[in-house]
Amino acid sequence: MKVQNLVEIIGADFYTGVPDSQLKALCNYLMDTYGIDQKHHIIAANEGNCTALAAGYHLATGKVPVVYMQNSGEGNIINPVASLLNDKVYAIPMIFIVGWRGEPGIHDEPQHIYQGEVTVKLLEDMDIATFIIGKDTTDDEVKAAMEQFKTVLAQGKQVAFVIRKGALTDAPKVEYKNDNTMVREEIIRHIVKVSGEDPIVSTTGKASRELFEIREANGQSHKYDFLTVGSMGHSSSIALGVAINKPERKVWCIDGDGAVLMHMGSMAVLGANKPKNMVHIVINNAAHETVGGMPTVAGQIDVVGVAKACGYPKAVCVDSFEALDRELEAAKARDELSLIEVKCSIGARDDLGRPTTTAIENKQNYMGYLSAGR
């Protein structure tokens, strides 16, 4: 189905969401049509944030908004859907567009398997009427579904279009770039060199894939690294849990700007606890690069200022490898919580692979290393 046809059938004039590779056609269409425009399109920090923002739009305009997301974001919308939107509470109508990663029978990454199995059930459990769009779904079928949805929306309820892999086509080409020069894979290579045999927790997406391949290229064990393949935004909290309980180890967290934004409250918890043995590195390319490159707001905020306001004793920003190496060495020697924001370009190798070990193997190897003596 052509993405423009879907947008025209829905007929909404406000979209907010978190980008998803399954919805890349829609994301590119919105960026090509609106860019980032407060009146028509806002990329939010997380899916719950989108839902609340869309609710405010409805309260102000009386119109029905659209929220787009990967199905992994369903967990983030459960609270606002159940306690804000539901027709037993405020009865706020809303259209969700959900990318169906991990659909049963379709090969996908391990973090998507169970989420894929329960995608439609979760929506139905939240009393959200659903319609699945696949490669063979016709425009007339979507039009008919939308007509039925209008009756549901008029009752103050919510509906969802669940998008199968490859279902949306004819996306405009959009180039995503910034002015930064440092490449993420090389940044991680420098981190690996300085961290040595210290344990690392790395964030969702390409950063963990690159870390895995760097270890392979170096002939190193993967036992040093916990690759957070799912639960975007929670790597720093995982690292905090490790650091508190392994005070004799220096613990490094390789984070991304989109992940930091998704659950920024974790920085406040980190700053309040001040683990002396933890280094929090935020690689900031101001983009959701792993799912296509759409922008985050991290290029417009002061990450270092946020960290300091949250109580981090030391926080710096670097935009050169010379400065990065200096700050990595200083953080390694420092006996207090440190944050290093690294300004990064957008882009990765076309042949970037994926971890060849299973998530369970990763966990077991990491736990074994943490429990063993140095």
Image (cartoon, rainbow, N blue to C red):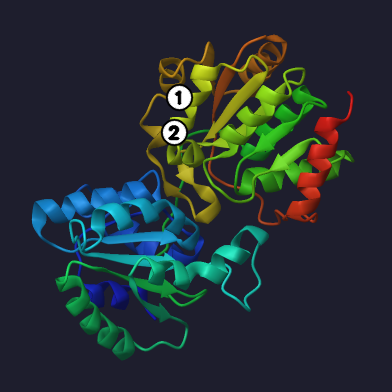
Q: Which residue is mark 1?
A: 268
Q: Position of residue 72 (x, y in %)?
A: 50, 58
Which residue appears at 60% of the width and 46% of the height? 204
81 sits left or right of 293 in the view: left
Q: Position of residue 34 (x, y in %)?
A: 26, 56
Q: Quadrant of the N terminus?
A: bottom left
Amino acid found under the numbered disc labelled 1: Ala
Question: Is residue 318 at least partly visible in the picture?
Answer: yes
Amino acid, disc 2 = Met
Of all residues shown, which one is farthest toward the front? 88
Taking the image as shown, residue 135 lies to the left or right of residue 60, namely right
> Residue at (34%, 71%) from the top-left corner?
160
The disc at residue 283 is none
Per the model, the C-alpha gap separating discs 2 and 1 is: 8 Å
Please say whether residue 171 is visible from this viewpoint.
no
Left or right of 223: which side holds 204? left
Q: Is residue 220 above or below residue 42?
A: above
Q: 163 or 284: which is nearer to us?
A: 163
Mark 2, secondary structure of its residue: loop
In which quadrant is the C terminus drawn?
top right
Q: Which residue was labeled with disc 2?
A: 264
Q: Are marks 2 and 1 in contact (CB under 8 Å)?
A: yes
Answer few, some or many: residues within 10 Å of disc 2's Cα (few below 14, many 20 plus, some between 14 and 19).
Answer: some
Q: What residue appears at the point 18 percent right and 66 percent down from the top-left corner?
A: 156
Instruction: Give whichever of 69, 85 is nearer the camera.
Output: 85
Q: Looking at the picture, tell me which residue is in the foreground, 290 or 113.
A: 113
